[in-house]
Image (cartoon, grey):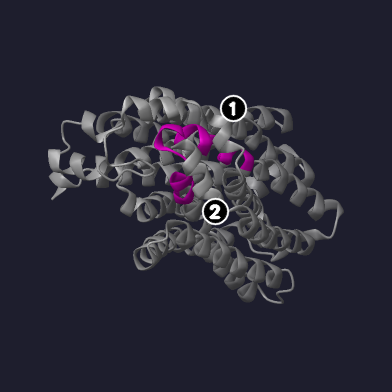
């Protein structure tokens, strides 16, 4: 069986990469109550530290995607994992606000290529009919990493100190790096463990890539359009905007949910480490479920664009309602339940965005275009943690932060309806043909 489905090994490698990535990323949020006390950092300063991660991250979203197109995902991912693991471990040496800002920027540089390089790997290794579930499964590791971060990082931090937790996670990252170099190659054709049957299955039906051989005349026509033709098109910008709105909610939860549970809901670190798992388990189900729903709708309608748009719009709509209701939740149980449901449906949207992008942009440009989209979308990572920190300390508190997140989810729906239309996508394909 494995002989004809080696791409499952690739999916598992990408799944664990996402898990470690978000375990690394959310560790600071879980340990924030202890770090703020130990290093004498306020909420507004902590929000800035959270945001500085995305200064390096956003830039290398695009650079990483460009590198994946030019040098291949194997080398780019190896470099990225090494850098993020190194600077995750370096967080253990933090002495104050300034050190944390510098380390988080460098840490963000390492994690920046992850999303686009994962998408490039999926584009290379999976046939079009499996893209939705492949993106859903591999990305499901991300919220699962955030889920296990609360108990693992929280309990290690309580028993051995918050600094040790960062060293443990860094070690896990280097172990994954070794596995990646051993088991992954840029394309199935390059891997001796992949059967000829599986290579034929994948290459015959790659995303945004025709089954027929590409003739020299076809290549000359494609070259007339540079990367700017695709990234500045209305559908690609629409996907980026919807992704941005999802990310604002994601990074609000990722950065501030532990502090919300401890400061606003008055849980201790141990209780927060247990209860804080629930929203991320919901998000994991959303990632997997969103991919399955996308592929099921595509099979039923034979309309790739419609199947992705339905998932994105419905996911953001339900998330917007739940996040708004959380702002007025009267009890801990209702708040956690609403956040969990919001996470489940919100996390159905990113894999739909990724797979939709693969249908709009040719395979030869997917790394660079995905990097540009990821850059724009992750500007939310700079804005969301900082704005939330200032709202908590100087504005309307957590209630105003939830309301703003809900408004942005609605904005994502509006942009998706206006910008991402079949007519505009078909126009891009005709001009690129």
Q: Position of residue 179 (x, y in %)?
A: 30, 34
Q: Which residues are magenta?
A: 355-376
Q: Position of residue 323 (x, y in %)?
A: 66, 66
Q: Residue furthest top?
A: 71
**Does residue 235 appear anywhere in the picture?**
yes
**What residue is rendered at 65% in x and 43% in y?**
381
**What residue is rendered at 36% in x and 68% in y?**
300
Q: Nearer the viewer, residue 244 or 266?
A: 244
User: Magenta includes 363?
Assistant: yes
- Could you give the CA–CA distance between mark 2 and mark 1, rounded to whole angstroms? 41 Å
Left or right of 428 in this view: 253: right
Q: Is residue 172 above or below residue 417?
A: above
Q: Position of residue 132 (x, y in %)?
A: 39, 55
**What residue is rendered at 47% in x and 57% in y?**
305
Q: Nearer the viewer, residue 157 or 193?
A: 193
Q: Is residue 168 above or below residue 153?
A: above
- Main SS of the magenta segment? helix
Q: Are marks 2 and 1 in contact (CB under 8 Å)?
A: no
Q: Quadrant of residue 108?
A: top right
**Does residue 151 appear anywhere in the picture?**
no
Residue designated by label 1: 106
Left or right of 66 in this view: 258: right
Q: Nearer the viewer, residue 189 or 274?
A: 189
Left or right of 188 in this view: 294: right
Circle nearer the viewer, 2 or 1:
2
Residue designated by label 2: 423
Give the mark nearest the N terminus, 2 or 1. 1
């Amino acid at each position: 069986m494995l002989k004809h489905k080696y791409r499952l090994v690739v999916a598992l490698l990408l799944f664990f990469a996402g898990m470690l990535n978000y375990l690394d990323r959310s560790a600071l949020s879980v340990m924030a109550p202890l770090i703020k006390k130990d290093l004498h950092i306020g909420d507004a300063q902590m929000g800035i530290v959270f945001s500085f991660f995305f200064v390096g991250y956003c830039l290398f979203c695009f650079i990483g995607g460009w590198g994946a197109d030019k040098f291949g995902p194997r080398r780019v991912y190896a470099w990225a994992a090494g850098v993020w693991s190194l600077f995750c471990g370096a967080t253990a040496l933090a002495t104050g606000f300034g050190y944390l800002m510098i380390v988080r920027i460098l840490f963000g540089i390492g994690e920046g290529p992850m999303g686009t390089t994962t998408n490039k790997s999926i584009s290379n290794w999976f046939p079009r009919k499996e893209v939705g579930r492949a993106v859903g499964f591999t990305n499901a590791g991300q919220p699962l990493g955030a889920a296990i971060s609360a108990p693992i990082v929280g309990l290690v931090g309580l028993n051995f100190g918050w600094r040790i937790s960062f060293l443990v996670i860094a070690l896990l990252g280097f172990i994954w790096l070794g596995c990646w170099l051993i088991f992954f190659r840029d394309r199935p054709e390059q891997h001796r463990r992949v059967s000829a049957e599986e290579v034929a299955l994948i290459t015959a039906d790659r995303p945004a890539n025709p089954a027929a051989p590409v003739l020299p005349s076809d290549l000359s026509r494609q070259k007339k359009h540079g990367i700017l033709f695709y990234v500045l098109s209305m559908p690609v910008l629409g996907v980026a905007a919807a992704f941005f709105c999802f990310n604002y909610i994601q990074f609000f939860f990722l950065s501030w949910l532990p502090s919300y549970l401890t400061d606003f809901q008055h849980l201790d670190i141990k209780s927060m480490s247990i209860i804080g798992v629930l929203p991320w388990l919901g998000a994991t189900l959303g990632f997997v479920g969103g991919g399955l729903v996308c592929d099921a709708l595509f099979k039923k309608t034979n309309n790739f664009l419609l199947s992705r748009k339905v998932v994105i719009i419905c996911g953001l709509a339900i998330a917007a309602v739940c996040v708004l209701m959380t702002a007025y939740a009267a009890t801990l149980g209702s708040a956690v339940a609403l956040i969990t449901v919001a996470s489940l449906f919100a996390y159905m949207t990113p894999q739909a965005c990724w797979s939709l992008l693969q249908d709009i942009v040719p395979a030869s440009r997917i790394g660079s275009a995905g990097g540009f989209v990821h850059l724009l979308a992750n500007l939310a990572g700079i804005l969301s943690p900082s704005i939330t920190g200032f709202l908590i300390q100087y504005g309307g508190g957590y209630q105003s932060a939830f309301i703003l997140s809900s408004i942005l989810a609605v904005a994502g729906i509006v942009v998706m309806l206006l910008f991402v239309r079949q007519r505009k996508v078909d126009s891009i394909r005709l001009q690129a043909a």
